[in-house]
Image (cartoon, helix red, strand yellow):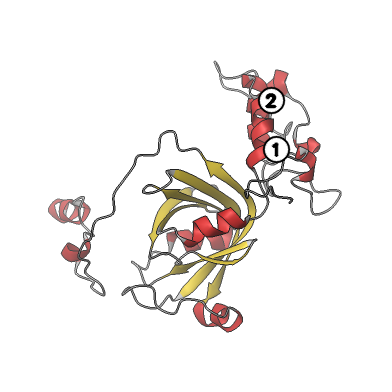
Amino acid sequence: MASRTDGRPAQQPANQLFQPANAQQPTGRPGRQQPGQAATTRSGGPPVRQALEPCAQQGQPGSGGEHLLQNAYGTRDRAARFYRDQVLDRLNDDMVTFVGRMEMAFIGTADAGGECDSTFRAGPPGFLHVLDDRRIAYPEYRGNGVLASLGNISENPHVGLLMIDFIEDLIGLHVNGRARIVEDADLRAETPGLPSEIERGGAPERWVVVHVEEAYVHCRKHIPRMQQVPRDRDWGTDDVRRKGGDYFGARARQGATR
């Protein structure tokens, strides 16, 4: 992907952004439904049947549903400009720098049946470790033992990461891709410089390595400005009260009904 000298992607025809893995595989996000495969609409919804056009065959990124609704709602040209100008299939230099200074990320996963989970990960700058322009790794710790996100990834590798700078530039970065679970020792053996202990939270047990398929900006218009302040943290404890584990009173209410 060519870049301008200021780090922004050079404008290219949309069909040069993403190429299918082989001639038979449809373009668009892998595993996503393509236009024409389920052309139905609820009462009062957009006229999807009237909007069927082979948008994905034009090489644009995005899902079949995106393209169908762009046609139905008349946003196709605006969406095409965004795909052309902003959507990359890898991290450019500015994105790598941005990821390297992030202290938090929101992560979306779904199981094989499409049931979704969103989660929050945080750490000092560098906890989101850029392995190269197509791979980001983030650590997984002991946690509560549920392993909801990892369980989803084991069934369905598609993940979405959202990183937002609430403090300095008020901008966000979306990264969509395919994830795999890698044990800490295995990733460490092949990755010099991988952080061994992130703050006082202990060493990671394993990592999630995300292979980038889409990377694009999240506009700053509605991002609130925040300010960092120091705080004390209770590291290495299983005490429910200190961890805030029953903040919403779920355990207390269940105990009262037994």
Q: Position of residue 131 (x, y in %)?
A: 59, 68
Cα distance between the residues tagged 1 and 2: 10 Å
Q: What residue is shown at x 39% (from left), y 55% (from top)?
A: 120
Q: In the figure, 31 relative to 123: above or below?
A: above
How many marks on residues?
2
Q: What residue is shown at x 71% (from left), y 43% (from top)?
A: 10
Residue 190: quarter of image: bottom right
Q: Residues within 10 Å of mark 2 (few under 14, many from 20)?
A: few
Lower sequence index among marks 1 and 2 = 2
Q: Which residue is at the front of the view, 160 or 230?
A: 230
Q: Position of residue 90 (x, y in %)?
A: 66, 55
Residue 122: quarter of image: bottom left
Q: In the figure, 38 relative to 156: above or below?
A: above
Whether residue 231 is visible here, answered yes or no, is: yes
Residue 222: quarter of image: top left
Q: Residues within 10 Å of mark 1 (few under 14, many from 20)?
A: many
Q: What residue is shown at x 43% (from left), y 75% (from top)?
A: 204
Question: Can you identify the residue that label 2 sits on?
Answer: 77
Q: Position of residue 232 (x, y in %)?
A: 20, 65
Q: In the figure, 5 relative to 47: above or below?
A: below
Whether residue 152 is visible here, answered yes or no, is: no
Q: Which residue is at the front of the view, 231 or 24?
A: 231
Query: Mark 1: which secondary structure?
Result: helix
Q: Name the image quarter holding the C terminus.
A: bottom left
Q: Position of residue 87 (x, y in %)?
A: 65, 43
Q: What residue is shown at x 13% (from left), y 53% (from top)?
A: 256
Question: Can you identify the residue that label 1 sits on?
Answer: 84
Which amino acid type is shown beneath numbered disc 2?
Asp
Which amino acid type is shown beneath numbered disc 1?
Arg
Query: Mark 2: which secondary structure?
Result: helix
